[in-house]
Image (cartoon, rainbow, N blue to C red):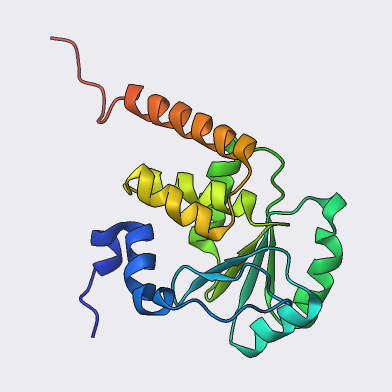
Amino acid sequence: MRPKGLRARLGFAGWLIAAGAAAAQEPPPADPDLPRLHRISAEVATSAQPSSEGLAKLQLRGYRAVMSLRIEEEGALEERLVVEKLGMEFIHLPVRDIDADAVQRFGQALRAAPRPLLIHGDSGNRVGALWMIERVLEGAALGEARAEAEAIGLVDSELTAQALATLNRLRRSSASQPSGPPSDPP
């Protein structure tokens, strides 16, 4: 039995890591239908663009949702039809740039999505970038989060720089905001 409030005490990302530590230790064999498949936990996996056959394999493994960061021009709308035909929920979160808006939308969608969940883009770069930022905002060390992002697929140096710049802006913004309610003047 899991202690009550474990997720709240560990934070969202810590809970994901703790829940899937054993599963994440041994990578699954390469599958061309699920390129760059990376299990973050028993509840969340990432990949590059899966094929229709890969989506069917996920459905057979019990996945309930697929979150696509691909834009319409990359075929996201066609994928929706396949995912929904398989009885899974399709979450379309188109991301062109790694900016504060994308980070906010990703975090909200991640927390609300049914599990098990696959998150993917075209190559894994955008997923890795957003995952890195989300992990750091949850309290993970940047080095640890960056290593996870690279394992997911973040290899593009320009996208990495964009993600780090966005992360720095978000950190500065949250540091400058008051931590409690304003006090009354004396």
Using the image as rendered, state which of residue 177 and residue 142 is in the foreground. 142
Point 58% across, 33% down: residue: 162
Q: Is residue 178 above or below residue 40?
A: above
Q: Residue at x 80, y 81 (%)?
A: 85
* Residue at the top extreme of this rendering: 186
Residue at 68% over, 53% down: 93
- Is 45 in front, or is 25? 25
Residue in the foreground of this view, choosing between 182 and 9: 9
Q: Residue furthest left?
A: 186
Which quadrant of the structure image shows residue 54? bottom right
Q: Please give the name of the residue rendered at 49% of the width and 76% of the height, measured from the top-left corner.
A: 27
* 169 left or right of 16 in image: right
Left or right: residue 92 versus residue 73 is left
In the displayed structure, 168 sits above or below 114; it is above
Which of the image's four quarters has the C terminus? Answer: top left
Asked if one can make out residue 120 in the rendered structure from this viewpoint, the answer is yes
How far from the left and from the top, in percent, is residue 83?
A: 75, 75
In the image, is 29 to the left or to the right of 26?
right
Determine whether 150 is above or below 64 in the image.
above
Residue 137 image point, x, y percent:
39, 43
In the rendered image, residue 30, in percent from the top left (x then y), is placed at 63, 77
- Residue 86 higher or lower than 41, as above or below: below
The reply, left or right, for residue 116 in relation to residue 26 is right
Q: Is residue 100 visible?
A: no
Task: Identify the image quadrant of the N terminus.
Answer: bottom left
Q: Position of residue 165 (x, y in %)?
A: 51, 29
